Amino acid sequence: MHCQPRISPVCVQEPIIGMILLGALVAFSNRRKLFLGWFLLLSILCLLGLYDFYLWEYDYGHNLDPKAPIQVPGMTYQPPLIGEKMLLNFNAMSYPATGFWFLMAALAFSFFAYFSKSRIRKKAAAGAWVVCLLAVAGCTPQPVAIHYGEDVCHYCQMGIADERYGAELVTSKGKVAVFDATECLLRYMQEQTTTEEDYAYMLTNTWDAPGEFNAWRNTTWLVSKELPSPMGAYLTAFRSAEEAKKVQQHNGGKLYGWKLLPAYLTTL
């Protein structure tokens, strides 16, 4: 099997919005030294963003579950900051997303403005301001499609293959974690001591719409011994509550709403 862990885009909108407002003031002033200061400040923020991403990767590769099915003594599973790296039979890939290139363009515009004449400087400043706005748009947290047969579960590190059982979390910063089953997502949240309020999106695949995401709040789960889920909790999600009831009639079991799932997991 040739799988690749999902390395999610990371973006913090607040500092970028602050830089947009500051950039507007710098452009209005049209002073060369202020353009240089704005360029240096944005450069520092970009480097801090890369460092934050490195720390997240370090935690991903070193903070391992002692019950993980694959353990190699002395080996860590930290993905590369940029590029590709083989981790056992997993190909970990990490490349800049759209927002990164917009920020690079903003840096280029501001650097050009510093060396330009007054009239051209204002146009370059406007260009930097516009691409920063685009960077914010590119950083808006969004769900990403699960690559079945390629992605691995963020919790148990097993390959994600069944389109009826996948799940996904997206934080307010845009970090994405994909899972091969609802139970892995719930156990991950319990260990991270996070709640629904900490995420921009909580999504799951469903039995009646394989491969498509459904919002956590709008999902019904059936616990039935006749429907084993990938990690053994017998949790199957349904987009339609009526469909869940029909399947329950044929397979038995109990229906759960999203708020009751954590309590069910503690009984396993």
Image (cartoon, grey):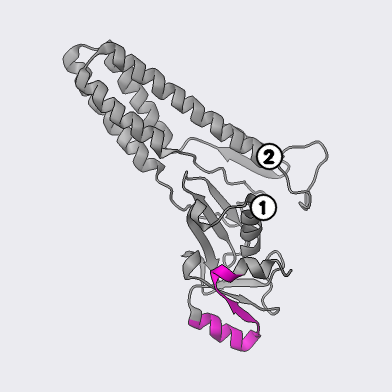
Residue interval drawn in magenta? 242-260
**First-in-chain label (2 vs 1):** 2
What residue did someone put label 1 on?
A: 191
Q: Is residue 131 left or right of residue 98?
A: left
- Give how far across and how far down residue 91 sits, in percent: 64, 42
Of all residues shown, which one is farthest toward the left? Answer: 119
Q: Amino acid at mark 2?
A: Gly
Relative to 143, is 84 above or below? Answer: above
| Residue 228 can be seen, yes or no | yes
Secondary structure at numbered mark 1: helix
Q: Nearer the viewer, mark 2 or mark 1?
A: 1
- Label 2, on which residue? 61
Name the dominant secondary structure of the magenta segment: helix
Residue beneath the point at 60% across and 34% down: 55
**Observer-nearest of 11 and 120:** 11
Q: Quadrant of the C terminus?
A: bottom right
Rendering coords of residue 174 (x, y %): 47, 45
Q: Which quarter of the figure has residue 44?
A: top left
Q: Quadrant of residue 244?
A: bottom right
Identified at 60% across, 88% down, the residue is 249
